[in-house]
Image (cartoon, rainbow, N blue to C red):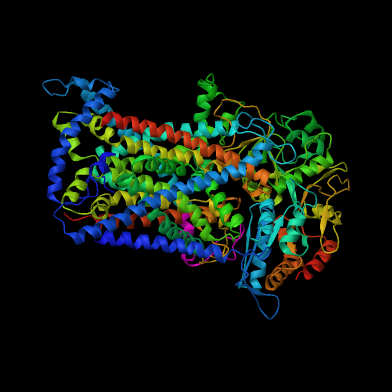
């Protein structure tokens, strides 16, 4: 979302000046170290830039080669990605295009009875995503703030490490863990809310990691300038640091949301599928798009396969809508200079 | 970067009024308390998950009659449970390595392309599409991989088996190289699955490279590629490693895509190094059997496998962390 | 300022949600075994058999299609009834039933009365219900041996040859053992590629029970939900069916409905009295020969897999509904009774025959109806 503008925040002119002054020497320092750490480039030797500063043939060739490789990588990556999108769209469009899809639940359909809607699953997915985000985003962002702005010493390293571990918890283990906690230990019913707790576990690390990276990129000079003006640290974080990194944070949250909205395994364990519209997070069953896909993919009839693709397409469309909204928020809420 | 907080103690400048100071202090205390609380919560959650896995796994492990780490047997119920994770470890690690080898270089290159090379008319929609693909649920990657992409990869497998069959990992393996449900296909599908994640995060980081760094490099007469190598890449490296780790986390723990694509082996099948073979990863093993967790012993055995995956992630992340720290030490 | 407010709001939201989580835990802390979902909404309507509200069941994937058909027929008359079935597997169904998460379970085998890893299913289920739990056979279905060998329209298999194929002893389609029982069929030299269910499954259990009973010398492994033969494992019935469909030389065991839907050919079985084609009639004959076991209203069916009766297709699967004889919540009991009565009715049983299942034989059906009527 910020491909063309590397720097969103322009808090005040003073900070800007400090930054430019500071940045130049630190930049060249980095360059020097980098040269030492990494000897020759893959093609040619870029170090003989020498006195004249003219680009020698080898360096130019390396530059062209890099350009070709970048284009090549892009094309290579785009092929399967466009292919998968095309598969989903071409297989799912027919059902998704019918008005019933958006207004009905799937009551009365089966592997052999085609048609039906996905309203029940759409409602379930949105509700669960909202509640998951409501819990996971504050925890995730605050943890990232802790790591970047406050964290020092052992606890910070421990937290950081634990976040890494959390990224590696397979979704099914998260599901089993919440099952053990909620059903076996607390003796509760399997309810959609319990499923959102396992989704929270999966979303937190994504939010923390991406937010952390973004916060680290906020130039230190901004903070110092703010402190110099007598702004307390927490206000600096809330009013300078977070807004500067806002678009990146939103991307991270959207990535996290996308991940949990497509997550299937914990939902199978904790929020069994139903064909009926059911919006109560504390009732027994709730349909979501992933479990709807899962319910239909284990059939060989065309009716079921069509529904599985259509549900996939619906999920992607919803996430696309989220992305667009997120982008809009990121753009309109940039801190004005 | 660690010095960010070191320099700037929350001490407001002497000119600020007493009132704003005290609210500042209170606000600071509340805010830092909240953020420390959130961090601690994460630690507690992970410890609880670890504790859960250990308490479930240990009783089953105590009754296990073969070496848990070196055996590939899997008999978990009855009086004489015999189970080990060697086979699972192999498939999990190998499929993730394939995924990383493909996804990280390509992902980083695409991110560089989008931030440094692509014309704006292309960069924006392409970035949007790739973000969108990070959103495609893994179950869809599984369906697509099995039905549409896998069959296309089969000739590639056969090519490798025919010309590089002398390398053990490309051994034709009794014609299984003609099969869709192999570790190789899973690895490639996983790579495609994590590619958008790696790309999206790397792109975000590269885009934040300070203008001054880039301009500095350019002013010294560097070509675009040299600018990338000397300014953009070093700046984004920790972020790229972090993105790769997120991707690796997904690949190691991916459940449904693997379960859908990968064929399991019949019990007692001897181990071969070939990538053109079936098998199970930790997560797919658990998923294939989660429906039948009817006794604590059985559940324990599967969660012991989950525990190994958990520890595996631990180790991988620790290594990555050391790499990042060392880089920092160099560049500061 | 805007962002500051945002942070405050979100931290408030956080504490709110956490508090909510606490409440949720407290409220649902009381389990109601065997009377899980929908106990609050479920309300019996005065007239007829309909109810409005939720009924939840979970278990065997083998009966999923029959169950859905039964639900659709039931809701034609009772539109307010919301009956959900999750095909997570027999073991999962029983586990959730015992944990009080579902109203009844679907299972490919009756509750076990002998101890397994220190637990006796029947006792646990009885305890969860606070009354005896009953097994009610509801759906029977043939397991087809589906294959993909171009040019071979008709294939006959004996139990011994089947066992040898699935243990990897017979490796090619033109093996003399196969040729011997298929005189006149032109068999190719294609390698045989058996597919099995990678998930634990009642279909695997019933198929291996058949092999162990009908060909004990060739199939020596203990029948189990987990596959113990050779081949490559694919997830779920749809997976093995698609696997065979896409693989020349493939063979698998799967519910008839999947083989039919995928357009696969399936083998005739010769248990010793000549080849028997898989038809509704031949399945009905085998089901009719099944012996009831169990006492009173707790019905179990004992299949004779080794039957040598002429014209009976022997590879069968019986799936049960596992219910409480007396539900703690009376409305739940009434609802279960109402739905299962419809499920066992002649109309529904005829309808599921069309999609590849076999109807309950008349004698068994009348016993089932008696048992269902006794559910409280």
Q: Nearer the viewer, residue A151 or C87?
A: A151
Was residue B128 drawn as part of the magenta stretch in this picture?
no
Write the residue at 46% across / 44% down.
Answer: A166
Q: Position of residue A198 (x, y in %)?
A: 50, 53
Asked whether, in this view, residue B42 is left or right of residue B213, the answer is: right
Residue C22 shows in the view:
yes
| Quadrant of the frame with the C terminus of chain B | top left
Is B94 situated above or below A79? above
| Quadrant of the frame with the N terminus of chain B | top left
Q: Position of residue B229 (x, y in %)?
A: 26, 30
Q: Position of residue B272 (x, y in %)?
A: 60, 25
Residue B129 shows in the view:
no
User: Number of numbered discs present?
Assistant: 0
Q: Position of residue B287 (x, y in %)?
A: 59, 45
Q: The magenta stretch spans which residues?
A: A92-117
Most distant residue in the left direction: A52
Is A308 situated above or below A220? below
Q: Residue C274: name its quadrant.
A: top right
Write the residue at 21% across / 40% down.
Answer: B210
Most distant residue in the bottom direction: C46
Asked whether, in this view, residue A37 is left or right of residue B89, the answer is: left
Is B107 situated above or below C29? above
Asked whether, in this view, residue A12 is left or right of residue B319, the answer is: left
Q: Nearer the viewer, residue A206 or B155?
A: A206
Write the residue at 60% across / 37% down.
Answer: B263
């Amino acid at each position: 979302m910020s491909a063309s503008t590397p720097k969103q925040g322009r808090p005040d002119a003073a900070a800007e000046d400090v930054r430019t002054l500071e940045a130049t020497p630190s930049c060249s320092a980095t360059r020097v170290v980098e040269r030492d750490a990494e000897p020759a480039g893959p093609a040619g030797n870029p170090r003989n830039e020498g006195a004249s500063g003219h680009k020698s043939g080898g360096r130019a060739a390396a530059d062209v080669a890099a350009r070709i490789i970048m284009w090549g990588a892009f094309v290579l990556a785009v092929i399967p990605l466009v292919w998968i999108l095309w598969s989903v769209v071409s297989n799912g469009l027919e059902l998704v295009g019918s008005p019933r899809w958006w207004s009905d639940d799937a009551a009365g359909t089966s592997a052999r009875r085609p048609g039906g809607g996905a309203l029940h699953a759409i409602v379930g997915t949105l509700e669960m995503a909202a509640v998951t985000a409501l819990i996971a985003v504050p925890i995730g962002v605050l943890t990232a703030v802790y790591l970047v702005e406050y964290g020092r010493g052992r606890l910070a390293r421990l937290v950081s490490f634990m976040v890494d571990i959390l990224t590696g918890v397979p979704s099914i283990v998260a599901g089993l863990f919440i099952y053990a906690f909620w059903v076996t230990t607390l003796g509760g019913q399997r309810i959609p809310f319990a499923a959102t707790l396992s989704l929270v576990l999966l979303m937190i690390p994504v939010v923390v990691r991406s937010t952390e990276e973004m916060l680290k990129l906020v130039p230190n000079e901004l903070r110092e300038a703010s402190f110099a003006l007598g702004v307390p640290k927490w206000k600096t974080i809330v009013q300078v640091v977070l807004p500067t990194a806002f678009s990146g944070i939103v991307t991270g949250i959207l990535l996290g949301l996308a991940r949990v909205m497509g997550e299937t395994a914990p939902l199978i364990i904790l929020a069994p599928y139903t064909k009926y519209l059911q919006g109560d997070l504390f009732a027994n069953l709730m349909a979501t798009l992933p479990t709807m896909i899962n319910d239909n993919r284990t059939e060989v009839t065309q009716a079921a396969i069509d529904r599985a693709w259509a549900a996939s397409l619906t999920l992607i469309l919803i996430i696309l809508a989220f992305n667009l909204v997120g982008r809009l928020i990121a753009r309109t809420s940039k801190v004005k200079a | 970067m660690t010095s960010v907080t070191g320099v700037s103690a929350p001490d407001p400048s002497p000119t600020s009024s007493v009132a704003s100071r005290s609210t500042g202090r209170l606000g600071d205390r509340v805010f830092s308390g909240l953020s420390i609380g959130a961090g601690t919560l994460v630690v507690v959650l992970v410890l609880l998950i670890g504790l859960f896995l250990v308490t479930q796994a240990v009783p089953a492990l105590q009754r296990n009659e073969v070496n848990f780490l070196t055996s590939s047997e899997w008999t978990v119920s009855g009086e004489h449970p015999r189970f080990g994770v060697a086979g699972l470890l192999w498939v999990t690690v190998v499929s993730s390595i394939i995924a990383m080898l493909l996804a990280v270089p390509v992902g980083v290159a695409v991110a560089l392309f989008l931030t440094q090379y692509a014309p704006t008319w292309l960069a924006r929609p392409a970035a949007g599409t790739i973000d969108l693909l990070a959103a495609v649920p893994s179950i869809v990657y599984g369906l697509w991989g099995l039905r549409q992409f896998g069959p296309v990869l089969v000739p590639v497998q056969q090519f490798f088996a025919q010309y590089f069959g002398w390398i053990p990992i490309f051994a034709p393996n009794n014609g299984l190289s003609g099969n869709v449900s192999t570790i190789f296909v899973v690895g490639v599908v996983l790579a495609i699955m994590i590619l958008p994640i790696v790309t999206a995060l790397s792109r975000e980081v590269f885009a934040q490279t300070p203008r001054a760094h880039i301009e500095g490099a350019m002013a010294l007469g560097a070509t675009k590629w040299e600018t990338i190598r000397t300014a953009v890449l070093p700046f984004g490296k920790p972020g790229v490693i972090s993105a790769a780790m997120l991707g690796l986390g997904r690949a190691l723990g991916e459940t449904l895509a693997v379960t859908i694509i990968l064929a399991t082996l019949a019990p007692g099948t001897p181990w071969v190094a070939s990538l053109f073979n079936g098998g199970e990863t930790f997560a797919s093993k658990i998923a294939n059997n989660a429906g039948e967790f009817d006794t604590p012993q059985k559940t324990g055995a599967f969660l012991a496998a989950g525990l190994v995956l958990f520890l595996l992630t631990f180790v991988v992340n620790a290594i990555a962390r050391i790499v990042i720290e060392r880089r920092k030490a160099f560049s500061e | 300022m805007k962002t500051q407010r945002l942070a405050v709001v979100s931290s408030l939201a956080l504490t709110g949600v956490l508090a909510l989580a606490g409440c949720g835990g407290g409220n649902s802390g009381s389990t109601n075994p065997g009377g899980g979902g929908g106990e609050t909404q479920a309300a019996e309507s005065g007239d007829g058999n309909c109810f409005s509200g939720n009924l939840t069941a979970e278990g065997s994937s083998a009966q999923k299609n029959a169950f859905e058909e039964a639900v659709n027929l039931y809701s034609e008359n009772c539109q307010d009834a919301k009956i959900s079935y999750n095909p997570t597997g027999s073991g999962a169904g029983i586990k959730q039933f015992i944990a009080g998460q579902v109203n009844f379970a679907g299972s490919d085998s009756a509750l076990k009365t002998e101890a397994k890893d220190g637990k006796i299913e029947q006792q646990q289920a009885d305890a969860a219900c606070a009354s005896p739990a009953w097994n009610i056979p509801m759906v029977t279905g043939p397991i087809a041996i589906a294959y993909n060998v171009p040019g071979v329209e008709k294939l006959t298999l004996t139990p011994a040859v089947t066992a040898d194929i699935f243990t990897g002893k017979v490796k090619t389609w033109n093996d003399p053992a196969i040729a011997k029982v298929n005189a006149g069929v032109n068999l190719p030299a294609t390698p045989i590629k058996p597919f099995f269910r990678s998930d634990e499954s009642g279909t695997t259990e019933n198929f291996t029970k058949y092999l162990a009973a009908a060909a004990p010398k060739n199939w020596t492994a203990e029948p189990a939900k987990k596959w113990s033969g050779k081949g490559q494992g694919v997830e779920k019935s749809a997976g093995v069916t698609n696997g065979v469909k896409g693989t020349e030389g493939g063979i698998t065991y799967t519910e008839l409905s999947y083989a039919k839907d995928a357009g696969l050919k399936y083998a005739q079985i010769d248990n010793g009295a000549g080849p028997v084609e898989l038809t509704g009639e031949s399945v009905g004959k085998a089901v009719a020969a099944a012996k009831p076991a169990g006492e009173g209203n707790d019905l179990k069916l004992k299949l004779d897999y080794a039957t040598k009766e002429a014209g009976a297709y022997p590879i069968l699967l019986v799936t049960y509904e596992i219910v409480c004889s007396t539900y703690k919540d009376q409305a739940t009991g009434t609802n279960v009774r109402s739905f299962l009565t419809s499920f066992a009715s002649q109309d529904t049983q005829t309808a599921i025959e069309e999609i590849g299942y076999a109807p309950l034989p008349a004698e068994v059906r009348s016993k089932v109806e008696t048992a269902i009527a006794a559910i409280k």
